[in-house]
Image (spheres, rainbow, N blue to C red):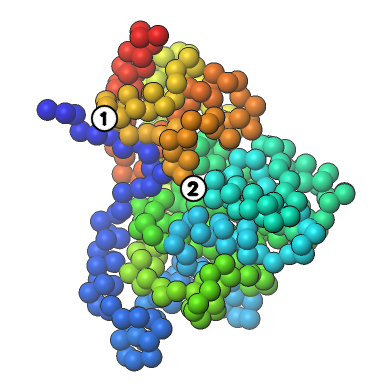
Amino acid sequence: MSQPSIYLDHNATTPIDPRVVEAMTRAWVDCGANPASQHAAGRQARRMLEDAREGIAELLGAKTGGMDADQVIFTSGGTEANNLAILGIQRHASEAIFVSSFEHPSVMAAVRELEHRGTVVRFAPPNKFNVWCDFWHTTAAGLVSVMLANNETGIINPVREIADTCRKRPVPLHTDAVQAVGKIPVNFRDLGVDAMTVAPHKFHGPLGIGALIVRHDVKLQPQLYGGFQQAALRPGTENVALAVGFHEALRLTIAELPDRAAQMQSLRDQLERSLRSELPEVIIIGEDAPRLPNTSCVSFPGLDRQQLVMALDLAGVACSTGSACASGSSEPSPTLAAMGLPEAQIRGAIRLSLGAFTTGAEIEEAARRIIKTVKHLRTKK
């Protein structure tokens, strides 16, 4: 009989919390109407949708009342929200876009599209954000985008400090907070950003929905057309049940965050210690930097990351080589390459990411399987 699989790929997506499923089921059962309809059932759906929207805004520290209230724009996920920010935040055609060199593929592809259209794109290397100030002496900046926490290494970036610099110009700042929310405290207004991407499937919520939170004074150009929903900034009939699930998952993760974060970090550290005890050549990438509590980017120099991930899958450990949106690519990780790591470290690096419901027994068994698999692969070389 095969061994039970151990899931250590929560940065790709998390299993949905049964309590979130219950909330979504109630929404489907109680009201299946279109929230744009004017009849009673439609108005009920609209109230459920707007309650979820306002709840999400409050939980993430966005302003919900007054003339300067921030916006929560529902999208199909983090990729669409990132595209809406990068392509949609209005700026002068001559102004450059500055991004870090370790962004998610959905940001990188969007800026490459703008570059194709004639926009100047500047890439800042990891941990050298003051390079933007140097560029600004000669280049007009129209937008800066830097992720709050890296999806491969878990390294947390100094977005608050970057926001302070951007505010002095002023230049709008977007942050992809998809990996951060649910693992560390995230407050939109406290960060000082102008737009922020969130996706609930990273914190045990539903797939198929995300959000772009936008400051009240940010001008946004829609990337989809054909409807009036969400002030025509993202037209299309909103999915009420997914919005309810988004809100419930966020409510639960913030309420339980202190315990969740402490548990994930304890188990992650246990996993890293176990690997090092038997595999002293192991390298933990980013271990000396501020990291998400659930993420470990581990390199096994001398091994091939793709071969190792496949071997671990056969051993019943689900992990990845980096972003799920770039899964299967034979190209070296752009993030690890931008960090200037040796080729052998990049080639042998995999990502192990825990969830809120990962157990100590799973981590103990996962370490045993990883150690056994790595030793086996080394004997074959």
Hey, what amino acid is under mark 2? Answer: Gln
Q: Residue at (34%, 91%) from the top-left corner?
A: 39
Report which residue position mark 2 lands on.
179
- Give coordinates of residue 38: x percent, y percent: 38, 91
Question: Residue 278 at what x, y percent from top left?
Answer: 38, 13
Disc ID at residue 225: none
- In this view, the residue farthest toward the left is 1
Seen in the picture, residue 294 relative to 280 is either above or below; the reply is below
Element on which disc 2 rests = loop
Query: Can residue 142 be seen here?
Result: yes
Q: Is residue 287 left or right of residue 357?
A: right
Quarter the C terminus occupies: top left
At 34% across and 27% down in the image, what residue appears?
310
Q: Is residue 73 above or below residue 169?
A: below
Question: Tag 1, which secondary structure?
Answer: loop
User: Within 10 Å of the Cα at label 2, are there few (<14), some (14-19), or many (20+) other Cα atoms?
Assistant: many
> Where, by quadrant of the figure, is residue 371 drawn?
top left
Residue under label 1: 316
Q: Does 244 sit above or below residue 368?
A: below
Residue at 60 percent across and 20 percent down: it is 342
- Type of the residue with mark 1: Gly
Q: Does the image show residue 375?
A: no
User: Considering only vertical position in the picture, is 129 above or below 255?
Assistant: above
| Quarter of the figure with residue 43 | bottom left
Residue 216: x and y in percent read 63, 73
Mark positioned earlier in the residue sequence (1 or 2): 2
Nearest to viewer (mark 1 / mark 2):
1
Front residue (pair 190, 351): 351
Q: Residues within 10 Å of mark 1 (few under 14, many from 20)?
A: some
Q: Residue at coordinates 44% horizontally, 17% vertically from top-left?
A: 303
